[in-house]
Amino acid sequence: MGDGTTSSVTLINKLDFGDPLYLHASDTATGTPFISIKLKGTENYNIWSRSMLLALGTKNKIGFIDGSVKKDETNEVLAKQWDRCNNVVLSWILGSMSEDLYSGQIFSTNAAVVWKELSETYDKVDASIVFNLHYKITTIKQNGQSIFDYYHTLNSLWKQYDALVKLPTCVCAAVTEFDEHNKMQKLMQFLMGLDDVYMTIRSNILSRDPVPDVKGAYAIISREESLRVRSGKESGKGSVSAFVAQTRKNNVNNNNSNNSRFNNFNNNNNNRFNNQGNRGPNPNLKCSKCNKLGHTIDRCFEIVGFPPGYRRPFNSGSSRNVSANNSVSDSVDAAPSSSVPVPFSLTNERMVKLMSLLSDNSSTS
């Protein structure tokens, strides 16, 4: 028994990695999906089967699904190795199916049988699937996507459509014309879905002789997109700089305008009060007591008395009455008192504070 076991191990170890019965340690590892998509049914069978064939080809295990690798009934060691490889391939297939389909195949024991059943059930060209795929191709739009994403999506739809709608093989001279026609159709579909910003470059492509194929058109528009992005960044920086400069200029103009406005207000205010203070006595009024113009006897200070806080002139006599009554006729500016209004004016300190507040408000706006 020991010799039999030793000979079996030796025989398995002698299998070359090019032999379909050879299994690498990674082939039996669990936890990692064999392919990235799950079989859902007719809608994605072609994509799923294509992905599965590629993955099985890298493992040299396609013979276990097409029946080309037969089980050796004469050699028990190789027969067991075949069973092991079959189970590994079967687990790969089952692991890449949706939950509903998985439950219907879990009791299967042969990978080739499962593969054939899946092909007979789901490998069908459904008219509704073809219609939906064709509709997506003819109505797809860029809608702000990058050129790379838009072209990648459209190219994937083309490949799916070509896999579903298989044309008969032709070896006549018309095959070249048909190939050119197919390329022209794809170019038109690609150009029709572009955003309007590429209208000019699209017209340029169509006016070329000869007209480039879809790959050439993609390369041209991709370069145009790169130029747009680069120029957009540069113009964006220039716009920001111009905006900042204009904002600063507006703030300066606003400050100057506010300064001029308040200066005018202050000057007008001072002039108004100065004009009131410089106004002469009223010639229509004459006092019978002192015979001076500007007041009547009932308002003569010699009779009614001088107002509180009034600074009396140094000189005495009638001239004192004249100057006193004349100055009081309009206002007692020469006698500062709490009862006498003081003309409003802006000092330099107040002007600085006001200008600071106006500058802050302009910057916030």
Image: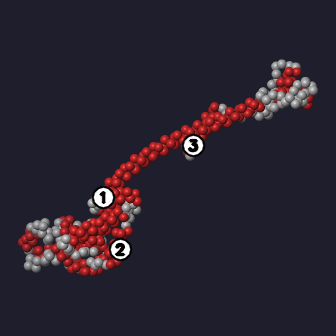
Residue that label 3 marks: 362
State the residue in front, 93 or 173: 173
* Image quadrant containing the N terminus: bottom left
Q: Quadrant of residue 302?
A: top right
Name the residue at 47% across, 43% down: 242
- Would residue 351 be found to the left or right of residue 82 on screen? right
- Would residue 166 be found to the left or right of residue 267 on screen? left
x, y percent for residue 15? 10, 68
x, y percent for residue 257? 60, 38
Dot 3 surroundings within 10 Å: few (below 14), some, or many (20 or more)? some
Q: Nearer the viewer, mark 3 or mark 1?
A: 1
Name the residue at 25% across, 78% down: 119
Residue that label 2 marks: 132
Considering only vertical position in the picture, is 114 above or below 12? below
Q: Quadrant of residue 176?
A: bottom left
The amino acid sitting under disc 3 is Ser
Residue that label 1 marks: 208
- SS for dot 2: helix
- SS for dot 1: loop
- Would residue 95 be found to the left or right of residue 308 on screen? left
Q: CA distance from mark 1 to mark 2?
A: 33 Å
x, y percent for residue 48? 27, 72
Whichever of callouts 1 and 2 sits on the residue coming sooner in the sequence is 2
Whichever of callouts 3 and 2 sits on the residue coming sooner in the sequence is 2
Dot 2 surroundings within 10 Å: few (below 14), some, or many (20 or more)? few
Q: Nearer the viewer, mark 1 or mark 2?
A: 1
Dot 1 surroundings within 10 Å: few (below 14), some, or many (20 or more)? few
Residue 277, numbered label: none
x, y percent for residue 305? 88, 28
Q: CA distance from mark 3 to mark 1?
A: 56 Å
